[in-house]
Structure formats: structure tokens, C-alpha cells
Image (spheres, rainbow, N blue to C red):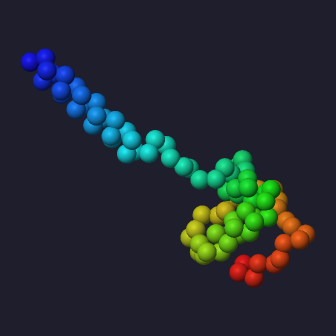
Amino acid sequence: MKQASMTRVFVASTVAAAVLAACGGGGDSGPALVAGTDVPVSATVDYQAATDFIKSIVAAGGSETNEPLVVGDVTLATSETADFDPSI
């Protein structure tokens, strides 16, 4: 009787652990954003990250029904030496 009870506890514990592991435990919520905006912090300090951010906006397309992008007073990173990216 005790053996069956211990087996149930073991199986229940194993199943619970598997379910919790499958959840992902919070996962990746994306890049850190500048407070109060939709702009990634990396886009304010790295030219390539700023370019990638703009490309993602262009790729998403625009629509009158989309939520507006909150940019606040953010200044994107620039570069004096990087070549112009014609894809944006």
C-alpha cells in the first residue's frame, strides 16, 4: 500500500515538473525599452540597433488602424562612419 502511494507521489511530482518546464517560466519579453516609449534602449546607443529598429517598423507596414508608436523624446543612435543603408 505504501509503495503504491509513493509511486503516485513520484509520478505526480514528475508530471508537475514537466508541466512547469514546458511553460517556459516567464521567457523572453523582448528588448528593454526606454521608459515610457516603444523604443529599445539599444537603438539609442548603437547605430546598427537603431537601423534594425527602423527596419522592423518599415517591415511591419503602416495602417490607420495600428496603435501609434510611442517615441517620446528619444534620440536614436547615429554614426559618422557607417554607410547609408538603402533598404530603409
Residue at 75% over, 66% down: 48
Residue that sits furthest to the front in the current view: 3
Residue that sits furthest to the top in the current view: 2
Which of the 4 image quarters holds residue 59? bottom right
Q: Position of residue 72 (x, y in %)?
A: 76, 56
Q: Position of residue 15 (x, y in %)?
A: 27, 37
Task: Establish if 26 lies above or below 81.
Answer: above
Residue that sits furthest to the right in the current view: 80
Tell me if 9 is positioned left or right of 80 in this view: left
Residue at 69% over, 67% down: 52
Q: Position of residue 2 (x, y in %)?
A: 13, 17
Q: Is residue 50 visible?
A: yes
Q: Is residue 37 visible?
A: no
Which of the 4 image quarters holds residue 75? bottom right
Task: Establish if 1 lies above or below 72.
Answer: above
Q: Position of residue 41 (x, y in %)?
A: 73, 53
Residue at 24% over, 31% down: 12
Residue that sits furthest to the left in the current view: 1
> Can you say which quadrant of the picture contains the C terminus?
bottom right
Tell me if 26 is positioned left or right of 19 in this view: right
> Can you say which quadrant of the picture contains the N terminus?
top left
Residue at 60% over, 64% down: 67
**Residue nearest the viewer, comparing 57 with 66:** 57
**Residue nearest the viewer, comparing 8 with 3:** 3
Tell me if 5 is positioned left or right of 29 in this view: left
Q: What number of labels is visible?
A: 0
**Residue nearest the viewer, comparing 72 with 42:** 42
